Amino acid sequence: MKNGANKAKYISIGVVILAFVLLIVLIIQFAQLAQLKAREAQLTDTLSSLEEVIADYNKQKDYYSDREAYLDEYAHEVLNMSQKGEIWYTADKN
């Protein structure tokens, strides 16, 4: 009977050790999961900011792709040039 009691003690100790090891593994996995979720949130933010940059570049590309319209607008706004038949009026500052 003593042999059976010792065997039960060893099995109980083994089960407790196994449960403890599994608990440690579970805690480590939860920690890694939290890190991965934080990284996912960071990557999602980076993705959205990069999508905004791409959208801005596409707007600029569309704006500059019509070269004639862009140059015409640039000539009017920056160089104060006019097209044929346009009349420029200036207001007197006094």
Image (cartoon, grey):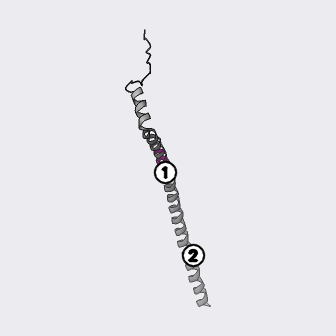
Q: Is residue 21 above or below residue 86?
A: below
> What label does residue 47 carry, if any?
1
Q: Is residue 55 magenta?
A: no
Quadrant housing residue 79: top left
Please name the residue that numbered disc 2 is placed on.
16
Quadrant housing residue 88: top left
> What label does residue 93 carry, if any?
none
Residue at image x 61%, y 86%? 5
Q: Position of residue 44 (x, y in %)?
A: 51, 52
Image quadrant in which the N terminus is located = bottom right
Q: Is residue 81 left or right of residue 25?
A: left
The crowd level at tag 1 (other Cα within 10 Å; few <14, some 14-19, many 20+) is few
User: Looking at the image, which residue sits at the far top?
Assistant: 94
User: Looking at the image, which residue sits at the far front?
Assistant: 85
Q: Amino acid at mark 2?
A: Val
Q: Position of residue 69 (x, y in %)?
A: 44, 34
Residue at image x 54%, y 63%? 30
Q: Amino acid at mark 1?
A: Leu
Q: Position of residue 31 (x, y in %)?
A: 51, 61
Q: Position of residue 15 (x, y in %)?
A: 58, 78
94 and 86: which is toward the camera: 86
* Label 1 vs label 2, nearer the camera: 1
Q: Regarding mark 1 in the picture, which secondary structure is present there?
A: helix
Q: Which residues are magenta?
A: 49-53
Q: How many marks?
A: 2
22 and 13: which is toward the camera: 22
The crowd level at tag 2 (other Cα within 10 Å; few <14, some 14-19, many 20+) is few
38 and 24: which is toward the camera: 38
